[in-house]
Amino acid sequence: MSIAVVTDSASDLEQGQIEGITVVPLHLHFGDEVFEDGLTLSKPDFWTKLDRVVAEDGILPTTSQASPGAFRDTYQRLIDDGADGVVAIHVSGKLSGTLNSARQGASLLEDAPPFEFVDSESASMAVGWAAEAALAATQAGADVVEAAEAARELAARTRTMLFVETLDYLLRGGRIGRARQLAGKLLRMRPLLELIEGEVADVERPRTRKKALDRLYAQIMSNGEPERVAILHGNAAADADALAQRVSESCGDMDVPVVLSSPVLGAHIGPGTVGATILRRA
């Protein structure tokens, strides 16, 4: 079988970054302007635009999932190119309607091949890594069910954690989840947040940025040396680079990539955020 692997831009993967994985762009809205994440608005351009628009107009961006029609068209192209099965791995269904839209898109196809949908219950590189696991499984001869299970198994071993400079972006975007009780208390803390069962929860409440970075490092290294780590940031490259170096040195010079968050994630975490995706050993 020729199985296609599909994800969305909340995976922090970009179209063409990994051969064999198709990335469907989600949408970013600045007032009346609408952009396709990673296609009509790049990561660096988003962060530059965000600083300017918030400073000048006080407007925070919003996001939306790709339409069922966009997913249908993506699937049809893959089928026309020879795919006889599709595994779709997406951002948490509790954070976005993307997974539901993807399912609806598949239902619009005539004579659809086998489909498997995976709710990563996470975001950013946790989604991207799950998509990579599905791809590796298909390349080893797995069918759609087996490839989806490979993605779920890897997703279950990941943690996605971050701290934010302000909760405004999460609050206004409605993605605050279990951490809602922190609203109004942020002036005295830099809360360390984690995606748990697909929604945002607060884990610790350090009071300074330095302590937040130290606690994030401690969480990365808890339960022994991780198998894989990526550091995420919202236009906070210096802190992200320093954290990546610290983790790398503690893990025998492990390669620890630093990832600038995509527009659709940046719209909800805001500038100054630093986070990590951590893959625990099996």
Image (cartoon, helix red, strand yellow):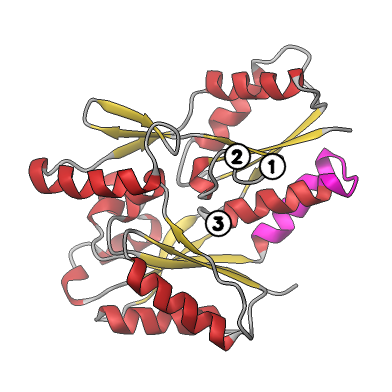
Residue behind mark 2:
16
Q: Which residues are magenta?
A: 138-155
State the image coordinates of residue 63 (x, y, percent, origin top left).
36, 37
Q: CB atoms at circles 2 and 1 under 8 Å apart?
A: yes
- Work out whether residue 74 or residue 174 is closer to the camera in this orientation and state it: 74
Q: Is residue 115 visible?
A: no
| Kind of residue at badge 1 | Glu
Residue pictured at 16% horizontal, 41% vertical: 59
Mark 2 or mark 3: which is in front?
Answer: 2
Residue behind mark 1:
19
Mark 3 or mark 1: which is in front?
Answer: 1
Indicate whether 228 appears above or below 21.
below
Residue pictured at 29% horizontal, 55% vertical: 270
- Numbered disc 3: secondary structure: helix
| Kind of residue at badge 3 | Met
Residue behind mark 3:
125
State the image coordinates of residue 202 (x, y, percent, origin top left).
39, 69
Chief secondary structure of the magenta span? helix
- Work out whether residue 182 or residue 39 is closer to the camera in this orientation and state it: 39
Left/right placement of residue 272 relative to residue 117 reads left
Residue pictured at 55% horizontal, 56% vertical: 125
Mark nearer the N terminus (3 vs 1):
1
- Residue 210 belongs to magenta span: no
- Numbered disc 1: secondary structure: loop
Residue at the outermost top position: 110
State the image coordinates of residue 171 (x, y, percent, origin top left).
27, 52
